[in-house]
Amino acid sequence: MIDGRPTASIMESLQGGTQAPQSNEEENKRAQEEQMRRDVMATVLDPAARERLSRIALVGPERAKQIEGILLRMAQSGQLRGRVSEEQLIGFLDQMEGSSKSGGKKSTIVYQRRKDLDDDFDI
């Protein structure tokens, strides 16, 4: 007790006491939403498709989130009939790839070979 107040309330006033419950609440809400998303993905995707989506998430987490968002919207609107197989998931990926290329973002690889001082072409 300092100045007639308990030390815990002093620490709360220094740390902004009301922020901790809000962040806990927000964290719990995010964890709950994440669990709900995982549950929906488990019911919508068959095991092979879930495995492929998890491998995609390892390489490109933002791409996996886009795919999950699309699948969630389709499931909520009733566009999905039954579980999504791995082949259907590949089809969705192909459609996304086609639409992203038409959007102007196109990735290309350019090889430039050196033409001078090549020892393979001795005369």
Image (spheres, helix red, strand yellow):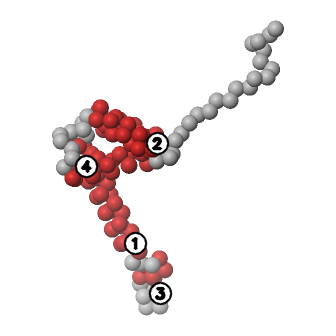
Q: Position of residue 106 (x, y in %)?
A: 52, 41
Q: Identify the disc placed on residue 74.
A: 4
Residue at 34% x, 34% y is 90
Disc 3 to disc 4, how far (Cα)? Answer: 59 Å
Q: Amino acid at mark 4?
A: Met
Could you say whether the residue bearing mark 1 is in a helix, strand or loop?
helix
Could you classify mark 1 by the number of other residues whose Cα lies within 10 Å: few (under 14), some (14-19), or many (20 or more)?
Answer: few
Mark nearer the viewer, 4 or 2: 2
Disc 2 to disc 1, how far (Cα)? Answer: 45 Å
Disc 2 to disc 3, how far (Cα)? Answer: 66 Å
Q: Is residue 76 or residue 49 the one in the foreground?
A: 76
Q: Which residue is mark 3?
A: 2
Q: Which residue is mark 2?
A: 101
Marks 3 and 4 in Cβ contact (< 8 Å): no
Could you say whether the residue bearing mark 2 is in a helix, strand or loop?
helix
Is residue 11 visible in the rendered image? The answer is no
Q: Amino acid at mark 3?
A: Ile
Could you say whether the residue bearing mark 3 is in a helix, strand or loop?
loop
